[in-house]
Amino acid sequence: MVVKIDKKKCISCAGCVAVCPVQALELKDKYPVCDEKCINCLSCIKFCPVAAINLVKGR
Ligand code: SF4
Ligand code: SF4
């Protein structure tokens, strides 16, 4: 599973980047991108104020 950002919903608050315990998220061109360090902890999904983050299958 991998974290995917819905760019139509994301307001670029960067909060998800701050809450990620393994620094798997990074803002690139205003939107967060998830790398292979993600441990699927769901912290970013719970944090996101606009529900722009989803877990999806694959990479
Ligand atoms: S699910 Fe957890 S580890 Fe993965 S990007 Fe979100 S906060 Fe980071
Ligand atoms: S927490 Fe949600 S709105 Fe904020 S940067 Fe992350 S994905 Fe975008």
Image (spheres, rainbow, N blue to C red):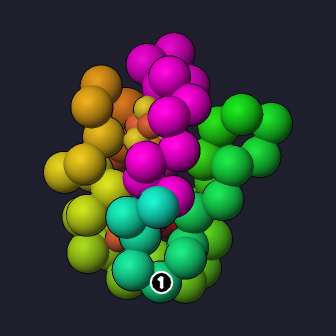
| Number of on-image labels | 1
Amino acid tagged 1: Val
Quadrant into which the N terminus falls? bottom left
In the image, 10: left or right of 51?
right
**Residue stretch in magenta:** 1-17
Quadrant into which the C terminus falls? bottom right
Q: Position of residue 49 (x, y in %)?
A: 27, 31
Within-10-Å neighbours for mark 1: few <14, some 14–19, many 20+: few
Task: Determine the residue located farthest toward the left in the rendered image.
Answer: 46
For the question of whether residue 52 can be seen, the reply is: yes
In the image, 31: left or right of 54?
right
With respect to residue 45, does 57 lie above or below? Answer: below
- Reply yes or no: does residue 2 show up in magenta: yes
> For residue 40, which quarter of the picture?
bottom left
In the image, 51: left or right of 59?
left
Q: Which residue is located at x 43 percent, y 48 percent? A: 15
Q: Which residue is located at x 26 percent, y 75 percent? A: 41
> Any atom of ligand 1 within 8 Å of the CB at mark 1?
yes
Q: Position of residue 19 (x, y in %)?
A: 37, 64
For the question of whether residue 57 can be seen, the reply is: no
Q: Position of residue 6 (x, y in %)?
A: 47, 29
Q: Considering the numbered disc 1 on the image, is that residue within a helix, a strand or a loop?
A: loop
- Reply yes or no: does residue 59 show up in magenta: no
User: Which residue in the protein does label 1 denote?
Assistant: 22
